[in-house]
Structures are given as C-alpha cells and as structure tokens.
Image: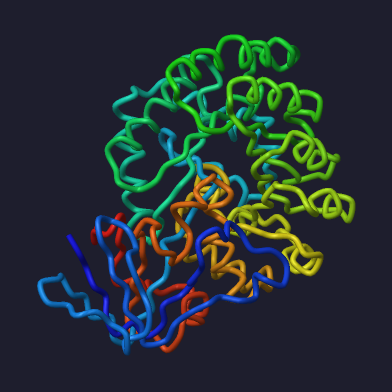
Amino acid sequence: MKTLIINIKELLQIREAGITKVSGKEMADLPLINNAFLLIENNLIADFGTMNNCPDGKGIHIIDAAGKAVLPAWCDSHTHIVYAGNRVQEFVDRINGLSYEEIANRGGGILNSAKRLNETSEEDIYLESKSRLEEVMHQGTGAVEIKSGYGLTVEGELKMLRVIQRLKNEYPIAIKATFLGAHAFPTEYKENHAGYIDVIVNEMLPKIAEEKLADYIDAFLETGYFSIEETERIMEAGKKYGLPAKIHVNQFTAINGIEACVKYDALSVDHLEIVTDEDIEVLKNSITMPVALPTCSFFISIPYTPARKMLDAGLPLALATDFNPGTTPSGNMNLVVAAACIKMKMTPEEAINAATLNGAYAMGLSETHGSITKGKKANLIITKPIASYYQLPYAFGSNLIESVMIEGKVI
C-alpha cells in the first residue's frame, strides 16, 4: 500500500542515509523542506521533496497536511514503562520535604516498586504496561527502550523482560529491552553486594541470554547504589553475552563513573544532571551518547543536565523521558522537548535532533528510525496546523499532534 502526504508546511529532519547522530554545533541545524510531499510505500519512506516535484497521486491514499508540520516520531531511549501500581504517596512525601534518598532509606523508591512487582501477576503487569505504551504512542513516540529493574529477583526480572518481549511482539512500535537487575540492592543483600552481583551475573544473565530477552544491560552507577567497580563487573558480564551497556550515571554525584562507561564502550550514559569538565573530556570522540532526562529533574526538583556546556564542548546529546513510577510518571516526549528548551536552554532545533536522530542512536536504531530518510520506517508525527515547529516547545501545555503514523499506518 502507498500513502502520499501532500502540502506539508514543514517537513522536518531531512537526512541522507548514513547520518547516525549529530554533535555540538551540528545540532543547531534541523534540515527541512517547506511545501513538501512525502511518499510511503510498504511501511517505509519511499520519497520526499517539494510539491513542485510531487508524484501523481492517482490510486494512492492521500493525506493533505496543509498548514501542518511532519517530523519523525520521537525516539525515547530511556524508560521504565513496565511496572506495577504507582508511588503516589512518595510524591506527597517529597512535597512534605523528604528527599529521594530519605524515601529510599525508608523502604520506598525502587524497593517499593520491586515489592509490588513481585506480588503482581505477569498478566496484570502486561495489562498495565500496554496501556502506558499505547499512551506514549499516541503522544508521538515511535521507538522506545524499556528497562527491567523492578524485579531484583531472578523470577521478577525474567517476568518483566517477558512482558517487554510480549509488547515487542504485539505492537508495531520499535522496542528495545534493557536488563537492569543492578537497579538497587535488595534488602537481603544490603550488606552483601558481591552476593547480589553474583546472582545477576551467574543466575539472571544466563537465563535472560538463553531466552534472548534483552538487547542491553544497565546499572545504577551512583553513590549509595552501584560503585564503579561493581558496575564494571556487570558491564563485563554483559559483554560476554553480547549485551552492550546503557548506564544510569551522574544523577546525584560525579564519581568518575562516566570514564568507566566509556572504557567499556557503553552505548549511552543517562541522567548526567551533574557533569564535570573531566566527564566532558572523557566523552569527546567516544561512541557513547549522553542522554538527558529533563522531566525527571522537573518532577523531583534536582538540577538539569548542563546541555549548553556539553553542546558548546562539541558533544552530542539525546533526550528521553525516564518514564517510571517514582521520579518521572510521564512518557510524554513533547513535554521533554519543551523542558529541554525552557530549562536547559536548548534551541528547538537542538531539542528535536536530540529527541529523534540522537535518541535513535542511543538505542541502536539509527539505520531505521529518527529521521526523514529514504528507506527508514515511516514513523511520523503530523501536527495540527501550526505557525512553525517552534510552537511545539513554545505551547508546552497543548497537544499539537493531529495524528501519529507507525510503520506507515495512522494509529
């Protein structure tokens, strides 16, 4: 089946094949075509250009996008969509003055979610998670990474990853699965870190690899969670099973964790609310994509990733939601893009590059997602009539999406 979108006011993120990411000053450039067409064939982008060169639409399904922008669907490279219940009480606890660390020390936080998940059936977790996935798809997300990490037991982690696998099989959106057994130390291993890491390496990983349930491995490399040495052991074990690393790091403190991640060729380092000059130097000329999560900073009132400093130093940057029950109960990438502009002083061009092309890179999807490129998946956002794409972050509280296409079909 063919679909022809005509009269597009602004067709954004036009790229030649082979461009996998943009960095530094390149991020300020968002290639576009005014008064454009886009042709979809067999779920892929087949052609695009100005309306002067628009093909004959006879016998083809036509979508008239007069006054509207068309851009690649968002690529959200960091989420925890699969979980049970919520942590609404912790939200109120923070309003009443408790910190993230204080809530965690009282048995809240990740351990709270782990308790709920292990008490909930796999079917119920799937039903909750598919509802969240459908929500983010309607908000314009066309590719998403989903982590485990709320099991913290062999069966709990496998249960989460099987739910992610089922979502992969039943929805057209591209999904990458990340094994995050090293999210926190279970209570019974609080004084025996090496014992829990043995469980991750010797019990969880072999079963996950046998069932082919994960694409990546992750750890919460942070003061009070997993040390550099502990994270290195996990990254090393992941490599043996063909799982590249995507690591939580520098959320609250900078302890030279980024250097370790780069040494192990991590695909991404995520959070980075605290970034040192040394961290920036280490990231230069590496294959590792820095990923910022601005709605997490917004929700729990911590610093924002210093985007301007990083981009001015020539680094790339991706944006993601961190959708999770405790620190970012939202998977809305439109709000992420707006927050990046408003709070991190990124330009709309930089933010859209970070949320599409660089987001695809951060989950290994550069060849198929993240830009308007011939041969890539026809995963698209069609906006409502807008003055310009600047309106997307400007009108941060409005839903400016008219329709979303996943693999060439309007959802």
Q: Is residue 224 left or right of residue 172?
A: right
User: What residue do we see at 47% from left, 64% from top?
Assistant: 371
In the orientation shown, which residue stands out farthest toward the right?
278
Is residue 16 placed above or below 9 in the rendered structure? above
Scheme of colours in the image? rainbow
Is residue 390 placed above or below 368 in the rendered structure? below
Q: Is residue 250 left or right of residue 155?
A: right
User: What residue do we see at 43% from left, 50% from top?
Assistant: 143
Q: How far across and how far down the image is residue 199, in percent?
A: 62, 11
Q: Is residue 283 left or right of residue 211?
A: right
Q: How far across and how far down the image is residue 51, in percent?
A: 32, 86
Residue situated in front as seen by the camera: 135 or 357: 357
Is residue 143 placed above or below 306 in the rendered structure? above
In the orientation shown, which residue stands out farthest toward the left?
59
**Within the image, what quadrant is residue 406 found in?**
bottom left
Q: How far across and how far down the image is residue 70, in percent?
A: 38, 74
Q: How far across and how far down the image is residue 55, in percent?
A: 24, 79
State which quarter of the image contains the C terminus.
bottom left
State which quarter of the image contains the N terminus.
bottom left
How many numbered tags mark residues here? 0
**Within the image, what quadrant is residue 225 found in?**
top right
Residue situated in front as seen by the camera: 99 or 333: 333
Residue situated in front as seen by the camera: 108 or 13: 13
